Image (cartoon, rainbow, N blue to C red):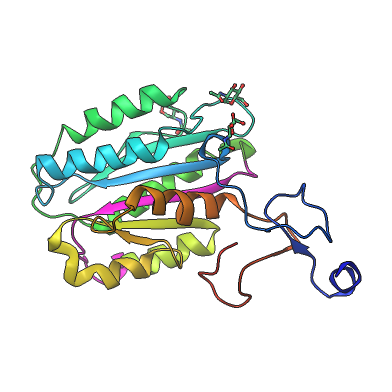
């Protein structure tokens, strides 16, 4: 085992770099929310498509997902979170430097959910675009530039605005730049378009509010997988090489 790994042409990296070669242990990354080292922008459709209960449900899901996280601006294995809302246009309500602790973030997310807007249309493109900008802005001057970045998109509808504002193309571009996208389809109104929404997501990270363990899926199959990565020049050890959605 040791010899074949070392002589193989790839360098294989296990999730936790503390694991030594040759040790016969499960190579899956540990999933401990309090140790995540991520920059995340949460994108919420708060148009008329979402009613009051729907928005409160989204807030409750987000609050539960991040309840154990260490949201902080401090260096170390901490998470920074920003909030973008969108209807016809998007607003960066809170950028990545806004939150210094988890409780303030959780209270704020309920506050945001209690302020739906009057737009009857929501364009995913605008939400994704603002999220990407917020992630870039949070990186200025090389700040936290080793930290993995993610967008969690809560969408109630899939509408496009013409070819130059194609959500799928924008999502490809975002993912090509190393940012992962988790999608959550909300309400029945998006049922027909769930497959389109899933195309925006990183493989294996498209979810729906009808999933029985949505919070667990976002945590284990989303954020923890994104947190599990290799330094440059190494190849991720996965449960199945060549399969994009394989566990890391
Ligand atoms: C997760 O990490 C925290 C902080 O390092 C630690 O206190 C806690 O016991 C860990 N939880 C699990 C389930 O390993
Ligand atoms: C959060 O991370 C910071 C920086 O590493 C650390 O000092 C602090 O104790 C952590 N807080 C919790 C609740 O784990
Ligand atoms: C975040 O928002 C604050 C307050 O609006 C602003 O002062 C700061 O420059 C912003 N930071 C980034 C990185 O965009």
Q: Give yes or no for residue 180 being in the magenta stretch.
A: no
Residue 99 visible, this orientation: no
The location of residue 100, given as percent across then percent down, is 47, 22
Q: Give yes or no for residue 163 being in the magenta stretch.
A: yes
Q: Measuring 14% from the left and 38% from the top, which residue is drawn there?
A: 116
Quarter of the picture containing the N terminus is bottom right
**Residue numbers of the magenta segment:** 145-166
Q: Quadrant for residue 114, please give it.
A: top left
Q: Quadrant for residue 142, please give it.
A: top right
Residue 3 visible, this orientation: yes
Q: Is residue 168 left or right of residue 76?
A: left
Q: Measuring 51% from the left and 39% from the top, which residue is drawn there?
A: 33
The location of residue 172, given as percent across then percent down, is 44, 67
**Nearer to me, 59 or 119:** 59
Q: Measuring 41% from the left and 36% from the top, which residue is drawn there?
A: 66
Q: Is residue 66 left or right of residue 13?
A: left
The total of numbered circles placed on residues is 0
**Nearer to me, 24 or 79:** 24
- Determine whether 83 is above or below 13 in the image: above
Q: Is residue 20 left or right of residue 72?
A: right
Q: Residue placed farthest to the front in the image?
A: 24
Q: Give the image quadrant in which the ligand numbered 1 is located.
A: top right
**Nearer to me, 13 or 144:** 13
Q: Measuring 73% from the left and 57% from the top, which residue is drawn there?
A: 25
Quarter of the picture containing the C terminus is bottom right
**Nearer to me, 205 or 114:** 205
The location of residue 146, given as percent across then percent down, is 65, 45
The location of residue 210, given as percent across then percent down, is 23, 58
């Amino acid at each position: 085992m040791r010899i074949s790994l070392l002589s193989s042409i790839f360098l294989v990296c296990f999730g936790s770099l503390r694991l030594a070669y040759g040790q016969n242990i499960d190579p899956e990354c540990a999933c401990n929310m309090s140790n995540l080292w991520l920059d995340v922008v949460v994108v919420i459709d708060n148009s008329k498509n979402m009613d009051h209960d729907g928005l409160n449900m989204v807030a409750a899901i987000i609050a539960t997902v991040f309840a154990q996280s260490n949201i902080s601006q401090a260096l170390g294995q901490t998470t920074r979170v920003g909030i973008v809302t969108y209807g016809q246009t998007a607003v960066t309500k809170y950028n990545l430097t806004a939150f210094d602790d988890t409780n303030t973030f959780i209270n704020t997310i309920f506050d945001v959910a209690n302020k739906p807007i009057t737009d009857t249309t929501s364009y995913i493109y605008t939400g994704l675009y603002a999220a990407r900008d917020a992630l870039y802005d949070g990186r200025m001057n090389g700040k936290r530039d080793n930290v993995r970045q993610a967008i969690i998109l809560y969408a109630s509808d899939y509408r496009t605005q013409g070819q130059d504002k194609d959500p799928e193309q924008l999502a490809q571009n975002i993912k090509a730049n190393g940012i992962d996208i988790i999608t959550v389809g909300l309400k029945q109104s998006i049922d027909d378009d769930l497959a389109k929404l899933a195309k925006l997501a990183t493989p294996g990270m498209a979810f729906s509010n009808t999933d029985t363990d949505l919070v667990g899926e976002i945590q284990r199959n989303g954020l923890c997988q994104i947190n599990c990565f290799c330094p440059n020049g190494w190849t991720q050890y996965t449960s199945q090489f060549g399969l994009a959605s394989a566990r890391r």
